[in-house]
Image (cartoon, helix red, strand yellow):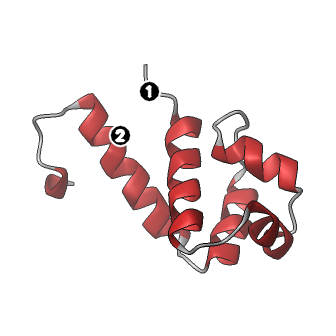
């Protein structure tokens, strides 16, 4: 079973790590506790839309770009034979 909070957390972690940034750096920039951000990235907590927007703002990426990537991962997981570009 696909758990949306896991896919979102994985995407946020990937983007943070691609930027070479620490949890501490992003949590401070997003005004969210380091522990909570860590739990969101590990898929242990459901992030509100406001929190997602704050994290994306701290990462300087549009929320829509994160959600687009999450959608692509969901399509791949649910329908591995479908072309992702068909969305």
Residue 72 picture location, percent across and down: 31, 50
Choose the circle earlier in sequence order: 1 or 2.
Answer: 1
Residue beneath the point at 85% across and 47% down: 35
Which mark is on residue 74?
Answer: 2
Mark 1, residue position: 2
**Rendered image: mark on residue 76:** none
Residue 10 shown left or right of residue 27 in the figure: left
SS label for mark 1? loop
Task: Say which quarter of the image contains residue 5.
Answer: top right
Question: Do residues under tags 1 and 2 come within 8 Å of each other at their CB atoms?
Answer: yes
Dot 2 crowding, Cα within 10 Å, few <14, some 14–19, many 20+:
some
Residue at image location 63% in from the left, 37% down from the top? 43
Residue 62, relative to residue 73: is it above or below? below
Vertical order, 1 against 60 (above or below) = above
**Residue at 63% across, 69% down:** 56
Residue 70 shown left or right of residue 77 in the figure: right
> Which percent across, then down, holds residue 30?
79, 70
Number of marks drawn: 2
Q: Residues within 10 Å of mark 1 (few under 14, many from 20)?
A: few
Q: Position of residue 80 (x, y in %)?
A: 17, 34
Please indicate whether residue 38 sits to the left or right of residue 75 in the image.
right
Q: Is residue 52 above or below residue 73?
A: below
* Residue 3 percent across, percent down from the top left: 51, 29
The Cα atoms of the two marked residues, 1 and 2, are separated by 8 Å
| Identity of the residue furthest to the top in this view | 1
Q: Secondary structure at mark 2?
A: helix
Image quarter (top left, top right, bottom left or bottom right) of the N terminus: top left
What residue is shown at x 87% (from left), y 68% (from top)?
31
Pick the residue in front: 13 or 73: 13
- Classify residue 23 by image quadrant: bottom right
């Amino acid at each position: 079973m696909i758990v949306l909070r896991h896919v979102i957390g994985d995407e946020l972690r990937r983007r943070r790590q691609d930027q070479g940034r620490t949890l501490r750096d992003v949590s401070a920039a997003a005004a969210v506790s380091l522990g909570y951000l860590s739990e969101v990235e590990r898929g242990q907590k459901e992030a509100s839309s406001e929190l997602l927007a704050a994290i994306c703002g701290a990462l300087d990426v549009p929320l829509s770009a994160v959600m687009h990537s999450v959608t692509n991962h969901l399509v791949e997981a649910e329908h591995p034979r479908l072309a992702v570009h068909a969305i």
